Image (cartoon, rainbow, N blue to C red):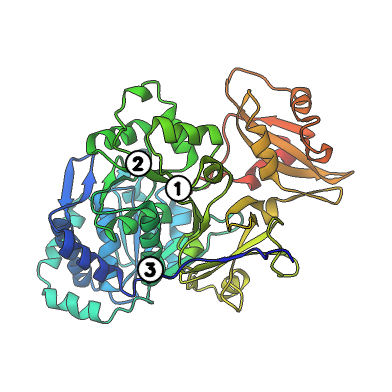
Amino acid sequence: MSTPSYAAGGTSVPLIDDTIGADLAFTVERFGDRDALVDVPSGRRWTYAEFGRAVEEVALGLLAKGVEKGDRVGIWAVNCPEWVMVQYATARVGAILVNINPAYRVHELGYVLRQAGVSVLIASTEHRTSDYRSMAEEVRADCPGLRDVVHIGDAGWDELIGLGAGVAPERLAEREARIDCYDPVNIQYTSGTTGFAKGATLSHHNILNNGYFVGELLGYTEADRVALPVPFYHCFGMVMGNLAITSHGACAVIPAPAFDPVATLHAVERERCTSLYGVPTMFIAELGLPDFATYDLSSLRTGVMAGSPCPEEVMKRIVTEMHMTEVSICYGMTETSPVSTQTRRDDDLARRTGTVGRVLPHIEVKVVDPDTGATVPCGEPGELCTRGYSVMLGYWDDPERTAEAVDADRWMHTGDLAVMDEDGYVRIVGRIKDMIIRGGENIYPREIEEFLYGHPKISDVQVIGVPDERYGEEIMACVILRDPAGTLTLDELDRYCRGRLAHYKIPRRLRVLESFPMTVSGKVRKVELREGATAGS
């Protein structure tokens, strides 16, 4: 009898049964004189004792502003120390932090503020082409629940801190005593491919434990220094980054307000970082710098890569040239806090590039037939489902869409197609909606993409299905060339595939692009590629 595609994480290390504020206090008590946070652009730095006091100042300011338990506080800002302080301060006062993508414009901002019922918005002043002051002012008339906007770095921020100075610390202690670790603490708007994004609502218990166990599998201690070029408004930055770091007494290093490959490597070198985070495109940009070899990255030992699959050649360079011998691949989604599976420090290169690792402690995963819901045997593709402490409380104020994603037995249906092997390692082969059905054959784009990565002219590739009168769908390869001035023909591609791929898996159409449309979390938006291909653009 074949082994079912099911795995459960170990339970020898217990879950943290505490709030985020209480966990931070424990870390401050143990590691008060160690570095907690470094902002390389401004040169500012905080020990844990100093960071704890800074968080308390913001928390007292929020109390002075009338923020009640359960109130929604929006954060619409680029990466900066104040972002991190607001994250922990809202947790301490029992508010729910609403993460807002700093790339949002007035229309998207207004939707989130209204849908979540945000009463206080904390925002940057400006960054690149974004004028957050004018956009926040413009949206206020359409958001009657929004009573206050505080801009980081101007008089409004100083006023917030000043107001807090007049609040007795005992009020904060009283508030914290009323907070339960199962209370909601964060709303993250997922990157929707159609319509408006959904607000995944997460508890202290959800995200504190997920951050902690990611850090455990990375081997974090108070000696680690973690470079975070990934955005804080996404789970990658604030959970796998900040919460993994503070739960272990390590140090968070901010290289820049937004990703910059030069600033990132400079921060690693200057602060002697031991860990570096990024999506594959970030690492590719760093490795591609003309002066890459001049940076001293010898302090690195580990890091996290997530967001999309990593080409094997890129991973080899990360391990050898960036010294990240213990780099880890993480897989998850916002709705699961986010990580469900992760490679281990001793996994070989094949497993780090071909799989997304094994299930985390205290979590279950299974692969099911999308039509019947039955668990499929190991080695067979199906939909990946996950269950455990990490599954969201639900989509904010949207029980109908919550019920579509989380079934009656609390299994989160990811929408991802996966294969599990006998050892419990999971390989993502695509999205259910990305699966191509050509003449009755189920085709998984990931398999073809992995094969085409080996083509000497191809730097990156995405495989999609496009409408076809004869077969229903036909396979199109969308490629980015290594040489931007080079060429690649469909005949060349066909010759490369012939005899090495099953005939029905060979792309019949080819589209050469300069870049791919991306989501905020670093995933390629295949829906846009399909729309462009169908429109003939």
Quadrant placement of the C terminus: top right
Mark 3, residues whose alpha carbon is within 10 Å: few (<14), some, or many (≥20)? few
Query: Tag 1, which secondary structure?
Result: loop
Query: Tag 2, which secondary structure?
Result: loop
Which residue is disc 2 drawn over? 301
Mark 1, residues whose alpha carbon is within 10 Å: few (<14), some, or many (≥20)? few
Which residue is disc 3 drawn over? 13
Q: Amino acid at mark 1?
A: Asp
The front one of 198 and 456 is: 456
Q: Amino acid at mark 2?
A: Arg
Q: Amino acid at mark 3?
A: Val
Left or right: where 189 falls relative to 126: right
Q: Is residue 138 visible?
A: no
The front one of 33 and 161 is: 33
Left or right: where 224 falls relative to 236: left
Question: Outermost residue toward the right?
Answer: 470
Residue 226 coordinates in the image, percent (x, y): 30, 46
Question: From the viewer's perspective, is residue 511 above or below residue 234?
Answer: above
**Mark 1 or mark 2: which comes first in sequence?**
2
Quadrant of the rendered image containing residue 57: bottom left
**Mark 3 or mark 1: which comes first in sequence?**
3
Which residue is disc 1 drawn over? 346
Residue 307 coordinates in the image, percent (x, y): 50, 48
Residue found at x 32% / y 22%: 294
For the residues labelled 3 and 1, the Cα–Cα distance comes to 19 Å
Question: From the viewer's perspective, is residue 325 above or below residue 457?
Answer: below
